[in-house]
Image (tube, grey):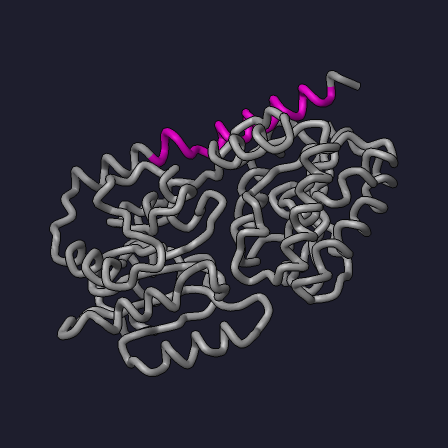
């Protein structure tokens, strides 16, 4: 079965939840005998080869602009995909889904994965939010089949569009035990004495709230480490860096991958996800897969993940977040807690199972031909 993919910036080594999702999903689907081609966005691509884990990577040029790049790139991808005569075109995210009717007119069968209603992100202006709602309508109305990465996203699609999406979550690989600590030496960190958060520097990730909450914790000798950066430098990301720079115990590492990221995850004392919006947060699943104690904002996407009720705080409530951090850095995290959490993640968010379920959707679409 020939699959062509668009809607992602690309992989490997590109930050973003959709990017990590696609990298892992298609690396597993290739093992099922699928012929997979991914159209990536040239400004983000650093990987030099044409193949990654058996997947064909084709970078296409596009403006590096948060308002234009997705739609321009997806339009080009649809035109190029037609030349490849795929059995299925798989479009990720509601912005790129605007091109679903165009792809159908060109005779392609289209699967759309909704990673969440992007128009709820704080970074978008109201005209952009209207455009994204229109894009969602186009994708959900004209797709051959729909995948939602979480049950609440599926429920929303059922209600608004009377479609019945397959619910297939994000996943995570259980990491091997990490014993090295070069990244800690580089950044001056002590094992189990720092709070970790990971993500892009956009308002909905809530890093400004996390920094304020950390600054409210008087007399602690922990550090706060935020891994990530902005895709597009703007006032928010610049202000965030200034805010972090005012406290010597706050460290911004930039975007990390590979062993440095594994080491930073492995040796953290607490993981915090303060987002006001998520689809299904891969970074939270990753932190849990490392056996870290985790706390998260109480938004629906985070509630989809099996954390205890005491591990949630009200999104945007800085005082509550401060109290939660203080409580959990003082609370023992037993080996039994760690094993239970890792086993749960391995069972519910296994990429091999996710690939199997995605292949079922592909076969359903293919049989309709």
Q: Is residue 261 left or right of residue 329?
A: right
* Horizontal and vertical percent position of residue 77: 78, 48
Q: Is residue 47 left or right of residue 187?
A: right
In the current view of this chain or complex, which residue is farthest to the top? 367
* Horizontal and vertical percent position of residue 129: 63, 54
Q: Is residue 167 above or below residue 224?
A: above
* Horizontal and vertical percent position of residue 86: 79, 33
What span is in magenta?
A: 345-366
Quadrant of res 123: bottom right
Q: Is residue 85 above or below residue 310?
A: above
Q: Main secondary structure of the magenta part?
A: helix
Number of marks in the image? 0
Q: Nearer the viewer, residue 349 or 130?
A: 130
Is 365 magenta? The answer is yes
Q: Is residue 49 left or right of residue 318?
A: right
Residue ID at (51%, 31%): 155
Q: Is residue 190 visible?
A: yes
Q: Nearer the viewer, residue 52 or 321?
A: 321
Is 214 magenta? The answer is no
Q: Is residue 157 above or below residue 128?
A: above
Q: Is residue 50 left or right of residue 116?
A: right
Residue ID at (59%, 27%): 165
Quadrant of res 289: top left
* Horizontal and vertical percent position of residue 39: 72, 49
Q: Is residue 38 visible?
A: no
Q: Quadrant of the C terminus?
A: top right
Residue ID at (65%, 61%): 45
Q: Quadrant of the N terminus?
A: top right
Residue ID at (13%, 74%): 219
């Amino acid at each position: 079965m020939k699959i062509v993919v668009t809607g992602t910036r690309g992989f490997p080594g590109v930050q973003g939840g959709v990017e990590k999702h696609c990298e892992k999903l298609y690396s597993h689907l290739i093992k099922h005998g699928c012929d997979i081609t991914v159209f990536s966005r040239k400004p983000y691509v650093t990987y030099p080869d044409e193949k990654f884990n058996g997947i064909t990577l084709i970078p296409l040029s596009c403006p590096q602009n948060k308002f234009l790049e997705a739609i321009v790139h997806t339009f080009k991808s649809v035109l190029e995909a037609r030349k490849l005569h795929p059995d299925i075109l798989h479009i990720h995210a509601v912005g790129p889904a605007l091109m679903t009717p165009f792809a159908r007119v060109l005779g392609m069968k289209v699967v759309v994965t909704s990673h969440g209603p992007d128009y709820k992100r704080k970074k978008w202006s109201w005209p952009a939010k209207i455009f994204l709602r229109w894009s969602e309508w186009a994708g959900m109305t004209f797709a051959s089949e729909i995948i939602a990465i979480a049950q609440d996203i599926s429920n929303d699609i059922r209600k608004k569009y009377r479609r019945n999406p397959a619910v297939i979550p994000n996943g995570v690989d259980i990491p091997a035990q990490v014993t090295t600590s070069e990244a800690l030496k580089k950044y001056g960190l002590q094992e189990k004495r720092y709070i970790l958060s990971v993500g892009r520097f956009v308002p909905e990730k809530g890093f400004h709230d996390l920094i304020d909450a950390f600054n409210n914790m008087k007399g602690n000798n922990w550090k706060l480490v935020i891994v990530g950066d902005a895709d597009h430098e703007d006032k928010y990301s610049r202000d965030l860096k200034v805010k972090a720079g005012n406290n010597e115990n706050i460290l911004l590492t930039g975007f990390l991958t590979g062993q440095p990221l594994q080491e930073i995850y492995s040796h953290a004392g607490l993981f915090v996800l303060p987002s006001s919006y998520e689809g299904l947060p891969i970074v939270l699943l990753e932190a849990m897969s490392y056996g870290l104690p985790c706390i998260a904002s109480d938004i629906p996407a985070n509630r989809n993940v099996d954390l205890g009720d005491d591990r949630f705080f009200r999104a945007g409530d800085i005082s509550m977040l401060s109290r939660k951090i203080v409580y959990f850095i003082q609370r023992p995290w037993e080996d039994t807690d760690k094993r239970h959490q890792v086993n749960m993640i391995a069972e519910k968010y296994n990429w091999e199972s996710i690939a199997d379920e995605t292949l079922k959707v592909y076969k359903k679409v293919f049989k309709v031909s």
